[in-house]
Image: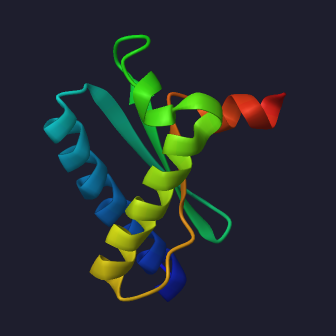
Amino acid sequence: MSEEQTLLDREGDAAADYLEGLLDIADLDGDIDIDVEGDRAMVSVLEVNPGDLKDLVGEDGEVLDALQELTRLAAARETGERSRLMLDIAGHRAARRAA
């Protein structure tokens, strides 16, 4: 495994840990999926119960954008490197990309 791949895996794991804590605090259910696409960690929070995560997306994704930045900061704190990870919640970004 390359050094960059290892860093992206660590970044994804750190982001997942941060998001699991957030979901616990907010008392929300969600499954976290971590993937690496190209040179970015991709982290998705998938709904367990439809509609549960809509507040984490917000209107037009503004809450999602803010959570992405906070998640990047948490990953950067853990890895010591600037994070470019992409966060998707409840398939919001995937749906926008498809449209």
Check the image and report above or below for 56 versus 13: above
Residue 21: image location, x then y, percent: 18, 48
Q: Residue at x 34, y 18 (%)?
A: 48
Q: Residue at x 44, y 87 (%)?
A: 81
The extreme right residue here reads 99
- Write down the quadrant of residue 29 in the picture: top left
Horizontal side of 69 relative to 19 (left or right) equals right
Residue 1: image location, x then y, percent: 47, 78
Instruction: Give the mark count.
Output: 0
- Write down the quadrant of residue 36 in the picture: bottom right
- Write down the quadrant of residue 13 in the picture: bottom left
- The one nearer the camera, 3 or 53, is 53
- The one nearer the camera, 13 or 45, is 45
Residue 76: image location, x then y, percent: 38, 78
Check the image and report above or below for 67 versus 69: above
- Residue 10 visible to the viewer: no
- Residue 38 visible to the viewer: yes
Q: State the colouring used for the structure image.
A: rainbow
Q: Residue at x 48, y 87 (%)?
A: 3
The C terminus is located in which quarter?
Answer: top right
- The one nearer the camera, 86 or 1, is 86
Q: Residue at x 52, y 32 (%)?
A: 58
